Image (cartoon, helix red, strand yellow):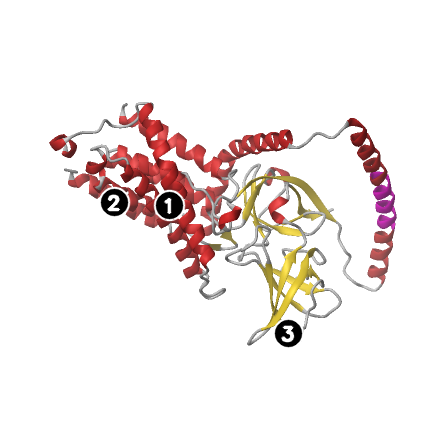
Amino acid sequence: MTRPINWIVAGVVVIGALALTSMQADSMRSLQAAFLSVMGPILGVGSDFQRTVNAAAEPKKPTGDLRRDNEQLLEEVRTLRTTNALLRDLEVENNKLREALQYRERSVFKLIPARIISRDASAWWNTVKINRGFEDGIEPDHPVLTESGLIGKTTTVSKNISTVLLITDENCRVAAKVEGTREQGIVSGMRVQKGDAGELQLNFLTKGANLQAGQKIYSAGVGGVFPSGIPIGTVKSFRVRELDGQAIIEPAEDISRVEDVFVIVGVK
Amino acid sequence: MNRWILLAILIVLVFLTLALQEFIPPLAVFWGARILLVPVFFCFGALELPLLLMLILAVFTGLVSDLMILQVIGDRVEIALGWSIVAYVLMGSVLQGLRTIYLRGRWEIHAFGSAFCTIAILGGQFLMITARRIDEGGLVFDWIVLWRILVPGSVALLVSPLIYFGARSLGMCLEPRRGRAAYR
């Protein structure tokens, strides 16, 4: 027979755990950040191992193909550098004109490259972990993107690992605008995603928005987290609901396959 | 094997499995259902260890599981730290009640216990999320939700005998006891 003292201990443990649930959100976030700092090296090793296995499984390219790819990439780098230099001149000119018109100066954002090291094993949340933390200047609520479009935002940030809440999660909400119209709404993920890549919903559109498939959706820059003009996705379908219009959006980036991302950490 | 050593081994296994789970891709054919192995190791411990050691394992498993999945968005926490501890303590206590039968050599208690724990944890998480988001997205229920709860439970059912017999071959299990000895 189990001694009654054991069940008293069990009761104390349950009461202690219930007390833990009433902790402040910031304290929980700090505890999680400390835990992720411990977990970081293990996840890093796991990620490196997974990459090595995936690379070994991929068919090897002949040397001739690699040389050709290298030449093409070098040419592309030269072209992009030249275009970038021209755009910098235009940016300076644009800011001067905006200043003359007393508009707020547009900022150039500082991007930190990061690698996705693991994907959330839970069934109900869409998050990933990246190999950058507060040591790299990352803070909670920093936008995360790729060259194709928006990925999500950081939530918990530890020393060298951060959790990114993906735009396919219901909790990640982005103010969005529709290309070529004055329509604005809120993009969020869905609680239960049917597909692997995920779909988004754009809510609070006007009933007469009548969006067409293929129209592009960009961040509106409202709310202070996501800057304006980042591609989010394209419209798949539109329907009128009782109070508003709703569009289903295909994300600009197939999030299930993304490996490398950028975090916007501030202005240059 | 000394029960304290088994507890230490299980704590390390739970910690490593938590990291390993992150690298197991979702099962696309089952609508993105995930494979969860932590409850399988916990249930093994809950049946092998006496109540006090089970409580230590439950606190550790619940705490690290919560810290791994904790979602803090702004000032809002989706499922607060501590709920998994409560869940593991309750499920561990139920399994302690079945320990006498388990100690007679009924390994299937571990298999069904693992499936039950996995289903209860995922179902509990879904209910808590639903309750928290009821004002925003309303009540969402789809048969995909059922897949995502039942498939990990079925996987736990299938995997647990491997863990039980693997542990047994390594001398980590209590020897089956017959008759009145099982009640002591």
Question: What kind of element bears circle 3?
Answer: loop
Task: Name the residue tied to disc 1.
Answer: B118
Q: Does the magenta stretch include residue A177?
A: no
> Between tags 3 and 1, which lies in front?
1
Locate residue B171, reporting x and y percent: 30, 23
Q: Which chain carries label 1?
A: B
Chain to which mark 3 belongs: A
Q: What kind of residue is marked 3?
A: Thr
What residue is disc 3 on?
Answer: A206
- Do pointers 3 and 1 mark residues of a single chain? no
> Crowdedness of circle 1 by 10 Å Cα count: few (<14), some, many (20+)?
many
Please name the residue that numbered disc 2 is placed on: B94
Mark on residue A123? none
Q: What stretch is highlighted in magenta?
A: A77-89
Q: What element carries label 1?
A: helix
In whole angstroms, how far apart are the C-alphas of marks 1 and 2? 14 Å
